[in-house]
Amino acid sequence: MTKEDYLRVWEDYLQERAYDDVLALADSFPDKRSLFIQFKSFERFNQEAADALLDNPKDVLWAAQESLHRLDIPLDVDLDRAAVRITHLPPTARLKARNLREYHPGKFVALEGMVRMASKVFDAITDVYVTCQGCGTGFFTKPARVKSNTVRCPNASCDRPGPFLKDLDRSRWVAKRIIQLQENPEGLKGGELPETIGVILTADLVENISPGNRVVVNGIVRLMEIKSKAGDTLDYEPYIEANSVEVIEREFEEIEITQEDEAEILALARSETLISDITRSIAPTIYGQEEVKEAIALQLVSSPQVPHSDGTTVRGDIHILLVGDPGIAKSQILKYVIGLAPRGVYTSGKGSSSAGLTAAAVKDEMADGRWTLEAGALPMADMGIAVIDELDKMQDKDREALHEGLEQQSISISKAGINATLRCRCSVLAAANPKSGRFDRTEPIPGQIKLAPPLLSRFDLIFVLFDIPDQEEDNKIASHILRVDRDDTLATPLVRPEMLRKYIAYARRNISPVLTDGAEIRLKEYYLNVRKKYDSAPNHPVPTTARQLQALIRLAKASARLRLSNHVDEQDAQRAIALTDFCLRRVGIDPATGQYDAGAIDVGVTKTQLNAITIIRNIIREVSEANNGLAPVLDILDATKKAGLDDDRVEKNLDRMKQAAELIEPRNGYYRLT
């Protein structure tokens, strides 16, 4: 077929199959500037032209564009700057970046991946207007011809090679953006590094694309010269000249579920031991930790986002923190989860900065040295799970970057002149160690976690894991490890990892649970009972807050979703309550009183500690006034002992006050309030 043949095919197709779409485009032009055509629709109309579109896209797309511009429509609209976009290419045209070969340049392909980097939108010149200084003739030409000095005046009586005067105001421009597309990590085999490829976006394609987006780019494979510092061409690198971009919004869309898979999923959901089977299928080589594994099972499916009419959205993703003594397999659990999650990103606190978690501004040579935004771990885990090991090893300023991402599920970036908001709608599973390496059972647990209270309070569940010698428990653990070492089949999950991945994807795609009256009453009763439990005590602590109630709702909905039920019943509510209560009894209890105290997590200080610090602060003030502004530590200890405070506790509170810059020690053994 010739170019004219393609033109006639497209003119007929637009008239017969897409005329209503063209009218809708004209009606909304220039707010909308693209006419989207599904490949299958064009293939049904003309198989030969559709095949040519994949093998010779330049001519076929030119014909599509030209026929749209020539089409006679009953509206006074010029569609000269509108574009025809081809979407949903067939499986034969869908490739990975690593599969591009020497025969692909010039072909029309579809590449699926994640936007790793995105440049700022800039204007690029498509046709430069020049004026011949010999005869005054003005005309449009391509910038490359001007740069290579191959332009001649079109005036036959002149036909000079210049000089020409460029008129940029009359030249034609187009919005342009460069992105780096990286292969989806969940599609990689063990040990493979993800490949990246550059993509050039133009016109309205530059809009609504951010680092972290999962997309399918449909476009033509081109080659770009790679030059040495001396200017010699060393090699050629492929890139994609995009024709269309499909943003994948549905969760785990890339996980293919066949009818046979769906039948197995539904059969598994009907099992009476479903929750137990899934829990035991998470890190089966690790003995015990049933509560942690059950919570992770709920986290993997999470609950749906809840949008409100006022524009706010309550997150549905569940955040979990594991804090424990060394040697209790925290990292092993995290590694297993990242291999189990259909979409996830793993990072370690030792090697992560705030830019590595959120986004970094870097210069991209493909974008002519312009600043581009490179997505970090949280945006890359959008619609999935981010696993952060050794969270306590991160710098404080780097951990601060997590605050917005955990609660608002967005990352606001203002770097190198780039102002953007990236989405990170993901669950976070993190692990940390106590400040001193091991927990001191005599001290309040929150004070031993090297994380700021505002960050701690954003986790729905905080598991405190102790390594306590116990003959009976140690015997069970040792027996389990030895049996697994001797017979590996004992570590085989009850639910195969690949089936569990599909089960999770199916649940997140299709199930959106709502609370039943019974579940709502059960959750409300628990919350109110905890709130009023110490209501009669004078100067009582706040035992729990509304934030914990929202966490309960998320957990209960996740429990229903794990059962593939659209209704949250009392059983789901009770499961959420049991997990929450298990965590609160470890981390949300004031050890001095045995009472629930939300301040232990939210502000890092229990009510008992706060009262003790208030007493100590008043004593230091009184002693200082009697000693020329300085309070000797011996006098402080004498006064606090009379107030009923233990010396060891007082000294620890003095250290805590010094760390908080409430107290200074001008000279050894003397204190002064700041």
Image: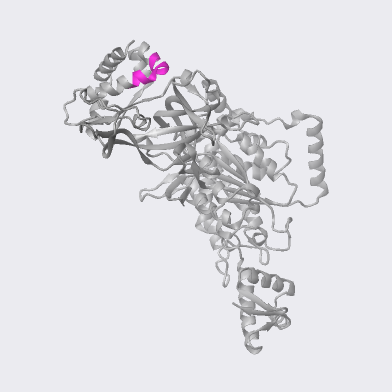
Q: Is residue 578 visible?
A: no
Residue 620 spot, x, y in % from top left: 64, 81
Q: Residue at x 62, y 53 (%)?
A: 394
Provide the residue span drawn in magenta. Answer: 51-61
Work out whether 192 lies above or below 355: above
Quarter of the image where one finds residue 202:
top left
Q: Residue at x 45, y 28 (%)?
A: 240
Residue 414 shown in magenta: no
Work out whether 202 lies above or below 475: above
Work out whether 130 lies above or below 459: above
Q: Nearer the viewer, residue 84 or 267?
A: 84
Quarter of the image where one finds residue 497:
top right
Q: Is residue 98 visible?
A: yes
How many marks can you see? 0
Q: Nearer the viewer, residue 137 or 586?
A: 137
Quarter of the image where one finds residue 25:
top left
Q: Main secondary structure of the magenta part?
A: helix
Q: Quadrant of the N terminus?
A: top left
Residue 262 spot, x, y in % from top left: 53, 25
Residue 261 spot, x, y in % from top left: 55, 23
